[in-house]
Amino acid sequence: MRADRLLSLLLLLQNRGRMTARELAAELEVSVRTIHRDIEALGASGVPVVAERGPLGGFRLMDGYRTRLTGLTDAEAGALFLAAVPGAARELGLGALLATARLKVRAALPAEPAEHARLVEERFHLDAPAWFREGDAVPHLETVARAVWERRVLRVHYRRWRGEVHRELLPLGMVLKGGVWYLVAAAVPGGAPDPGPPLTTAEGTGEGTGTPGGTGPDTVRTYRVSRLLSAEAGEETFERPAGFDLAGHWERSSRRLEEALRPTTAELRISPRARRLLPMRFGAVAVEALEGAGPPDGEGWIRVTMRVETTTVAVGDLLSLGAEAEVIGPAELREAVAREAGATARRYAPPGPAPDPER
């Protein structure tokens, strides 16, 4: 909307001082011609904008002029809670609201705190997604976010590892984890039961199988937003379950998923180098294992007990440590690692001498 853009332009000039038309256009994502028209509109409304010519020129506000239009709307105030993750705000369709809210807050601050805020923004940046991975395509993210915000029943077509399903959901919240968006939702009371076990890493996390038609915590599940084939917010609204805590639900759900995915433990003997590699390869479970490690032996190696996934997965994971780790137990895992290591050694063994045709 033009009124919002004019206010953003005014606050940019107040907060940053002189800016060129090109800089303003880039900031507001419009054309330079639009900026010139907006500058004229501000002048016509009584805002003293000074145009300075030359290579160091640009637009600025007359010395001493400050706007008092710094009150936040409800939507802008809500968007401020995403200030630490501006990329996520843009994905949710709140980028413009967040930008305006930040400008208003800075304009309302006294000079010294405003300068401190500018320096923090200048020197610190949060980039949530992990390295070397493409972000999920989430074409239905704004629809889902709007349904969460407006408490509207959400009708989805969802892709699961065992087939596609249609669901009517009560969207309770959204979580951004490692650059991946998840929807936390309950089944519509009286709806069809969700067949099969809780969702796993292929689809998200699960809170439990639950009771069909209920709205308690046992029916709350987590859906990966990128797996939504379609999403439509209905006209019907719903009441959120009393006392539902999104952060607490996510923590419990994540912990249960972690335990389900790592059902067993492996006893390892690792080198000093592997002690440094372990947290980078295995994350929190490695840190936990190292905290309970025994004393180093004469070669500096230590023994740790670490939670691992199924034997098939654990073999590949542990072989990534190469000769810097030895699996002590359980016996099944040690034998599986030995078989895989032996097969790899044979694959890379140099060819033997050619057979003697005289023999």
Image: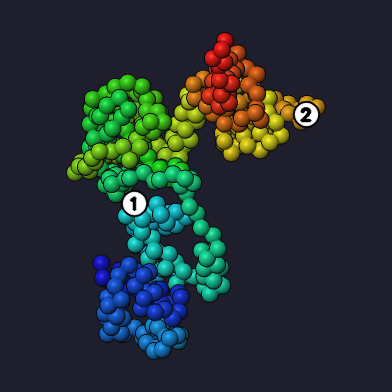
The residue lying toward the viewer, choosing from 238 and 115, is: 115
Q: Which quarter of the figure has residue 198?
A: top left
Q: Residue at x 51, y 20 (%)?
A: 311
Residue found farthest to the front: 358
In the image, is 37 to the left or to the right of 67?
Answer: left
- 1 or 2: mark nearer the eye: 2
Query: Residue 284 location, x and y as percent?
Result: 57, 35
Query: Residue 239 location, x and y as percent?
Result: 29, 39
Where 352 sits versus 1, above or below?
above
Residue underneath mark 2? 299
Q: Residue at x 52, y 27 (%)?
A: 316
Where 344 sits versus 107, above or below?
above
SS category of the residue bearing label 1? loop
What residue type is disc 2 on? Glu
Q: Residue at x 21, y 42 (%)?
A: 232
Q: Split into 4 quadrants, where in the image is the C terminus?
A: top right
CA gap between label 1 and label 2 equals: 53 Å
Where 55 sits versus 211, above or below?
below
Query: Residue 288 location, x and y as percent?
Result: 62, 31
How many numbered marks does the figure carry? 2
Residue underneath mark 1? 92
What residue type is disc 1 on? Leu
How crowded pointer 2 is (Cα within 10 Å; few <14, some 14-19, many 20+) is rated as: few
Q: Split into 4 quadrants, where in the image is the N terminus?
A: bottom left
Residue found farthest to the left: 235
How crowded pointer 1 is (Cα within 10 Å; few <14, some 14-19, many 20+) is rated as: some
